[in-house]
C-alpha cells in the first residue's frame, strides 16, 4: 500500500508540474472535454453502427498544433479514434466537424477523407477494408461525395437538385490546371506527385510521378502534409488557362532540384466520367434523349471502363433498339442497375427467360427499397416481364391441378424472384400450403446445403456479413427453405440491422406458420421492433 500511495503522489505531482510549467497546458480542458463530448461521440457511434468497444480514445488538438481555419474553430478540436480506423473530428462543444478513415498511413487517410467540395478515392486502399469498414466508408461517400449526394436526391425524385449537385462536383473534376494529383507524405514534409495525367500540361513539361514539390512560385511548401494546407496547395496548382505556375521539384537520382514553369490548361479527371454518366441517366429519366446521348458520349470518351459511363451508354443503346450492343457493353458489370438494363435488353429481343434470369440476380433488398431513381428502371423491367409472369402463373395452375407439387414449386420460384412485395407474400402463403402437405420439400438440395453450411461457418466465426452472402446464394437455388430465412434473420440482428432481421423472420413464419418455435419467433419480432424504433430516434 505505501508503494501505491507513493506512486499516486508522484503522478499527482507530475500532472501539476506539467500544468504549471505550460508543457501540457490543455490537460484540464482535455479532461473536461471527455465528459462534454461523450454524448456526442456515443450518438455518432450509433449512427455509424460502431460498437462501444470500438472507441480507442480521443485527443485534443490546440490551435498551436493544427490549422483550425478550415473547421471554423478557434480554441481547438477533438479527434475520436475507433479501433478499425474510423475518426471523428469534433468541436469543443461536441459538434461533428468531419469524418474520415485512417488506414495504415497518413497519406491513405487523406485518400479516404471526404468533404463537400472535393471527392477523393483510392480503390486499392478500399479493397483492403473489412466489410464493416466498407459499410461506413460508403456512408461517408453518401454524406459527403457529390455523386452519392446526387444519387440520394434522385432517390427522392429531386432531379433539379441532383443536377446542381452533379454540376458542383464536375467543377472540381473539370478545371484549368496542371494535370497532377498530389499526396501527403506526413507532417512537416513536402508533398509528392502521385500521378501525372496523360497529355496534360504537367506531362508536356516533363513532370513525373514521384517528384517531390518543394516550392510553388518561389514559396516553400514544406508542411503541406495536413489536408487543410494540401487544399491550399491544390488551389495554387490551378488557374486560368494560359496562366503560369513555377514549380521546384526534387527528383530521385538527380543532385539538384528541377525548375519547371507550367502553363495551366483544361483538365478532365477520370472520375468525371461517373458524374457525367449519372447526368446522362437523369436526362434519360426525363426523356430528354439528346442531352442523355451527349453526356453519355462525354462519359465514355473520358473513361470507357467506368461502370456508370457504360450503364448510361447502354440505356441509350436499348432505347435505340441496339440490344446486343447494350449487353456486350455491360459485359461483366454486376451492379443491380446494370442487371436491370441487361434485363431490358433481353426483353427487347423477346428472350423473356434470359430477361428474368438477369432480373433474379438482383438482391431482393435492392428491389424492395423505395427509390424513385432505381424504381424508374425497375418499373420498366417489370413492365417488360409482364407476359413472362402471366405464363408462369398459368404453368403453376396447370401443375397444381395435376398434383405435380415439385414442378409447381419450380414455377413459383421463377415467379417469386420477379414479383413485387405484395405478390411475393401471396406466393409465400401459397407455397406454405404445399410445404405443409409434404415436409420433405423443406429439405435442402445438396447445392443449397453447401452454401448454407458455408454461411454457418462464417456465422460461427462472427463474420455475419459474409454469412448472409452465403445464405443468399443458397436462397437463389432454393428460395422456399424456411430455416435459411430464420438463420439469416439472426445474422442481421447481430449487425443491428433489425429491419432486415424482422423481414426475414416474417418470411420464415409465412413459409412455416406452424413451426414449433413460431410463438418464440413472433415474440422476437416484437423485441427487434423496439430496438429498431430506438435506433431510428437516435
Image (cartoon, grey):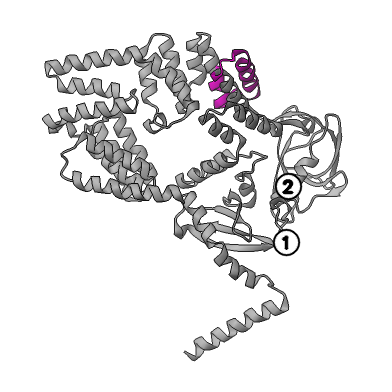
Q: Give the labeled residue for mark 2.
A: 230
Left or right relative to 260: residue 275: left
In the foreground, 252 or 383 = 383
Q: Position of residue 169 (x, y in %)?
A: 66, 33
Q: Give the labeled residue for mark 1.
A: 63
Which residue corresponds to the image point at 37% horizontal and 38% vertical from the top-left?
469
Instruction: Judge whether residue 64 can be spotted in this image.
Output: yes
From the viewer's perspective, is residue 408 above or below residue 41? above
Q: Main secondary structure of the magenta part?
A: helix
Marks 1/2 in contact by CB < 8 Å: the verdict is no
Q: Position of residue 456 (x, y in %)?
A: 29, 44
> Residue 280 lies in magenta, yes or no?
no
Q: Position of residue 320 (x, y in %)?
A: 53, 9
Instruction: Judge whether residue 185 can be spotted in this image.
Output: no
In the foreground, 250 or 274 = 274
Q: Position of residue 301 (x, y in %)?
A: 65, 20
Which residue corresponds to the image point at 19% horizontal and 36% vertical from the top-left?
512
The range drawn in magenta is 285-313
From the viewer's perspective, is residue 294 above or below residue 458? above
Q: Residue furthest bottom?
A: 2
| Earlier residue among tags 1 and 2 | 1
Amino acid at each position: 500500500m505505501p508503494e501505491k500511495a507513493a506512486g499516486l503522489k508522484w503522478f499527482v505531482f507530475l500532472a501539476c508540474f506539467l500544468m504549471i510549467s505550460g508543457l501540457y497546458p490543455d490537460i484540464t480542458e482535455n479532461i473536461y472535454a471527455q465528459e462534454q463530448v461523450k454524448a456526442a461521440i456515443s450518438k455518432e457511434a450509433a449512427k455509424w453502427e460502431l460498437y462501444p468497444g470500438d472507441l480507442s480514445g480521443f485527443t485534443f488538438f490546440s490551435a498551436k498544433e493544427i490549422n483550425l481555419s478550415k473547421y471554423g474553430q478557434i480554441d481547438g478540436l477533438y479527434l475520436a479514434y475507433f479501433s478499425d480506423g474510423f475518426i471523428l473530428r469534433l468541436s469543443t462543444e461536441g459538434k461533428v466537424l468531419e469524418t474520415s478513415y485512417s488506414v495504415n498511413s497518413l497519406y491513405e487517410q487523406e485518400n479516404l477523407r471526404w468533404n463537400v467540395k472535393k471527392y477523393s478515392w483510392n480503390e486499392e486502399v478500399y479493397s483492403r477494408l473489412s466489410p464493416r469498414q466498407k459499410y461506413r466508408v460508403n456512408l461517408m461517400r453518401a454524406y459527403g461525395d457529390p455523386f452519392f449526394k446526387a444519387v440520394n436526391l434522385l432517390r427522392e425524385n429531386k432531379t433539379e437538385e441532383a443536377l446542381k449537385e452533379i454540376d458542383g462536383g464536375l467543377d472540381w473534376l473539370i478545371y484549368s490546371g496542371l494535370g497532377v494529383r498530389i499526396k501527403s507524405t506526413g507532417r512537416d514534409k513536402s508533398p509528392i506527385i502521385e500521378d501525372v495525367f496523360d497529355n496534360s500540361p504537367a506531362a508536356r513539361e516533363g513532370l513525373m510521378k514521384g517528384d517531390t514539390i518543394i516550392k510553388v512560385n518561389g514559396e516553400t511548401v514544406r508542411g503541406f502534409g495536413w489536408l487543410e494546407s494540401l487544399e491550399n496547395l491544390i488551389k495554387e496548382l490551378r488557374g486560368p488557362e494560359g496562366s503560369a505556375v513555377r514549380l521546384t521539384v526534387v527528383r530521385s537520382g538527380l543532385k539538384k532540384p528541377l525548375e519547371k514553369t507550367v502553363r495551366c490548361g483544361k483538365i478532365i479527371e477520370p472520375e468525371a466520367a461517373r458524374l457525367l454518366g449519372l447526368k446522362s441517366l437523369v436526362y434519360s429519366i426525363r426523356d430528354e434523349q439528346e442531352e442523355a446521348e451527349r453526356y453519355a458520349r462525354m462519359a465514355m470518351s473520358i473513361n470507357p471502363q467506368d461502370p456508370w459511363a457504360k450503364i448510361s451508354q447502354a440505356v441509350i443503346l436499348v432505347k435505340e433498339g441496339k440490344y446486343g450492343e447494350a449487353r456486350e457493353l455491360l459485359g461483366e458489370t454486376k451492379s443491380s442497375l446494370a442487371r436491370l438494363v441487361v434485363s431490358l435488353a433481353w426483353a427487347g429481343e423477346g428472350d423473356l427467360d434470359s430477361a428474368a434470369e438477369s432480373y433474379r440476380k438482383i438482391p431482393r433488398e435492392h428491389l424492395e427499397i423505395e427509390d424513385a431513381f432505381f424504381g424508374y428502371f425497375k418499373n420498366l423491367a417489370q413492365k417488360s416481364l409482364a407476359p413472362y409472369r402471366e405464363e408462369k402463373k398459368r404453368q403453376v395452375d396447370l401443375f397444381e391441378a395435376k398434383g405435380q407439387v415439385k414442378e409447381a414449386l419450380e414455377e413459383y420460384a421463377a415467379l417469386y424472384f420477379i414479383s413485387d412485395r405484395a405478390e411475393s407474400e401471396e406466393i409465400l402463403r401459397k407455397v406454405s400450403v404445399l410445404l405443409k402437405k409434404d415436409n420433405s420439400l423443406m429439405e435442402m438440395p445438396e447445392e443449397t446445403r453447401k452454401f448454407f453450411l458455408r454461411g454457418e461457418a462464417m456465422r460461427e466465426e462472427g463474420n455475419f456479413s459474409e454469412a448472409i452472402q452465403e445464405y443468399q446464394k443458397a436462397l437463389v437455388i432454393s428460395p422456399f427453405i424456411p430455416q435459411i430465412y430464420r438463420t439469416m434473420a439472426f445474422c442481421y440482428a447481430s449487425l443491428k440491422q433489425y429491419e432486415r432481421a424482422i423481414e426475414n423472420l416474417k418470411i420464415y413464419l409465412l413459409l412455416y406458420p406452424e413451426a414449433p418455435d413460431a410463438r418464440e419467433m413472433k415474440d422476437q419480432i416484437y423485441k427487434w421492433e423496439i430496438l429498431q424504433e430506438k435506433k431510428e430516434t437516435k
